[in-house]
Image (tube, rainbow, N blue to C red):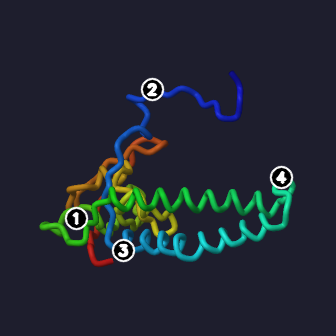
């Protein structure tokens, strides 16, 4: 059977995409998701529904590109609203500092130094808050797993595509 939806078979036991994701999120991340949900529900959905209604009123829907496009867009917005509603119910908001702020835990801003002396600054956040521009990584990422529970001065061993890389923790901060 051939087609564009065919993918290669992966062993579920070895597929990293099958690993359960943590349901943690910072309070800022949760409020950001709520704001997106609110915007989609109150602004975007009614706006697109009105466009669909206008396009449908023009007559033949089978050849109406406006109707087709806006209907697909409306379905996409409805699916996103449904996903966000479900996801927000599943998430556990972490809104307090850990008992021991000298160690790396969820929400920490961490500065690292690699073997070459280059500085890396990142933050450990939930899966829904990942931002590569800000260097916010998921708590489920291999780098974050290697850092969890470590203190300033300790070394973390991270498996990269080029082999193992060693990082020394230089700063741990929870205020940002």
Query: Of the numbered discs in the image, which one, if any, rests on residue 62?
Result: 4
* Nearer the camera: disc 4 or disc 1: 4
Quadrant of the snapshot with the C terminus: bottom left
User: In terms of sequence position, does the residue under pointer 4 or pointer 1 come before the other?
Assistant: 4
* Helix, strand or loop at mark 1: loop
Cα–Cα span, label 1 and label 2: 38 Å
* Nearer the camera: disc 3 or disc 1: 3
Residue 58: image quadrant is bottom right
Cα–Cα span, label 4 and label 2: 43 Å
Name the residue that disc number 3 marks: 28
**Which residue lies at the image location 21% right of the left edge and 72% below the top edge?**
96
Quick one: 14 or 66, which is closer to the camera? 66
Name the residue that disc number 2 marks: 11
Name the residue that disc number 1 marks: 152
* Helix, strand or loop at mark 3: helix
Query: Of the numbered discs in the image, which one, if any, rests on residue 27?
Result: none
Residue 115: image quadrant is bottom left
Rendering coords of residue 73 (x, y %): 67, 61
Mark 3 crowd level (few <14, some 14–19, many ≥20, 10 Å Cα): few
* Nearer the camera: disc 3 or disc 4: 4
Quick one: 11 or 76, which is closer to the camera? 76
Cα–Cα span, label 4 and label 1: 64 Å
User: In terms of sequence position, does the residue under pointer 3 or pointer 4 come before the other?
Assistant: 3
Cα–Cα span, label 3 and label 4: 44 Å
* Helix, strand or loop at mark 4: loop
Cα–Cα span, label 3 and label 2: 36 Å
* Nearer the camera: disc 4 or disc 2: 4
Cα–Cα span, label 3 and label 1: 26 Å
């Amino acid at each position: 059977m051939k087609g564009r939806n065919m993918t290669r078979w992966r062993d579920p036991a070895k597929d990293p995409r099958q690993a359960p994701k943590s349901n943690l999120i910072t309070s800022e991340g949760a409020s950001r998701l709520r704001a997106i949900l609110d915007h989609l529900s109150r602004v975007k959905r009614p706006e697109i529904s009105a466009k669909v209604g206008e396009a449908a009123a023009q007559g033949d829907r089978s050849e109406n590109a406006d109707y087709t496009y806006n209907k697909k867009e409306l379905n996409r917005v409805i699916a996103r609203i449904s996903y966000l509603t479900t996801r927000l119910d599943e998430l556990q908001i972490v809104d307090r500092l850990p008992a021991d702020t000298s160690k790396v835990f969820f929400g920490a801003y961490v500065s690292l130094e690699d073997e070459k002396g280059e500085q890396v600054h990142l933050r450990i956040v939930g899966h829904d808050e990942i931002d590569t521009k800000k260097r916010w990584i998921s708590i489920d990422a291999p780098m974050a797993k290697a850092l969890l529970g470590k203190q300033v001065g300790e070394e973390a061993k991270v498996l990269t595509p080029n082999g193992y890389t060693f990082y020394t923790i230089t700063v741990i901060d929870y205020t940002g």
